[in-house]
Image: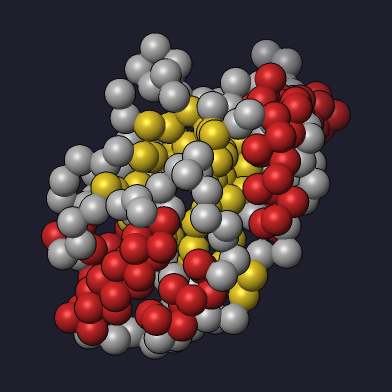
């Protein structure tokens, strides 16, 4: 019986490593281009912010994005520097558009609402506003659930009075695990989970961020890919 040589063993190990890398690369490329079935979810779109970079709105409109949500503000002091350009770009190509605020547990609700409504133009054609609830490293505060729900209701009432539309609540799993927003704030839910349908808020969602790594023509950076429940 012929024993395997050192060179032969090394060749097989190298081949296995190359094959594994090729498989991983193919899987990553597939994941970056994946979207849920259009048969199951006919309406799909994106959410963006300044980190997304410059967007080719014409290409996005032609690439089957039906809508875009864009971050307008965060906390009580931050206006997204790309918001005005994104708002104008989406309007120009006829893409449905809406604004999102990243809520902070470290800032008063009224101040955050003021930041949002002074950033986002009144626009009857815009989609309903969105408040995004997620734990972030820049804010370590963890108020009580009653305090958080009270602040959220104040914020929502103020932005809804300004826009004339009922807001959506986008809540991450870690935030909801602490504050049970789905059981205390009665607004349309928008949930997050890469590739698999989310089920963490205790009631049905209407919006789902299905991927945070979607790559599209016309955008240099990954975008969040969102779908609407049929």
Estimate the x, y position of residue 120 in percent, counting from the top left. Answer: 56, 60
What residue appears at the point 66 percent right and 21 percent down from the top-left corner? 63
What residue appears at the point 38 percent right and 32 percent down from the top-left corner? 228
What residue appears at the point 46 percent right and 83 percent down from the top-left corner? 111
From the viewer's perspective, is 151 left or right of 163? Answer: left
Is residue 3 shown above or below 202? above
Estimate the x, y position of residue 73 in percent, counting from the top left. Answer: 57, 67
Q: Residue furthest right?
A: 7
User: Which of these two is toward me, 93 or 230?
Assistant: 93
Is residue 191 shown above or below 115? above
Number of marks drawn: 0
From the viewer's perspective, is 50 left or right of 185? Answer: right
What residue appears at the point 66 percent right and 65 percent down from the top-left corner? 80
Estimate the x, y position of residue 217 in percent, counting from the top left. Answer: 75, 28
From the viewer's perspective, is 57 left or right of 142? Answer: right
Estimate the x, y position of residue 54 in percent, counting from the top left. Answer: 80, 46
Is the image coloured rainbow, by chain, by secondary structure, or in one colour?
Answer: secondary structure
Q: Is residue 25 visible?
A: no
Is residue 87 shown above or below 160? above
Q: Is residue 122 visible?
A: yes
Is residue 27 shown above or below 100? above
């Amino acid at each position: 019986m012929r024993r395997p040589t050192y060179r032969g063993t090394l060749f097989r190990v190298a081949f296995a490593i190359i094959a594994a890398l090729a498989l991983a690369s193919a899987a990553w490329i597939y994941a970056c281009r994946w979207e849920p079935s259009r048969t199951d979810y006919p309406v799909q779109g994106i959410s963006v912010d300044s980190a997304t970079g410059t967007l080719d709105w014409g290409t996005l409109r032609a690439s089957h994005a039906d809508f875009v949500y864009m971050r307008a503000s965060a906390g009580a002091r931050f206006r997204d520097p790309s918001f005005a350009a994104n708002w104008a770009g989406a309007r120009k190509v006829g893409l449905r558009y809406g604004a999102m605020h990243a809520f902070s547990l470290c800032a008063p609700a009224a101040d955050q609402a003021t930041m949002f409504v002074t950033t986002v133009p009144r626009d009857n054609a815009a989609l309903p506003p969105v408040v995004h609830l997620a734990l972030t490293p820049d804010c370590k505060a963890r108020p009580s659930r009653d305090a958080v729900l009270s602040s959220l209701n104040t914020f929502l009432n103020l932005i809804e009075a300004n826009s004339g539309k009922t807001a959506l609540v986008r809540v991450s799993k870690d935030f909801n695990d602490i504050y049970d927003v789905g059981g205390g704030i009665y607004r349309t839910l928008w949930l997050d989970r890469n590739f698999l349908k989310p089920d963490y808020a205790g009631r049905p969602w209407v919006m789902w961020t299905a991927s945070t790594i979607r790559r599209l023509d016309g955008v240099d950076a990954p975008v969040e890919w969102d779908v609407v429940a049929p």
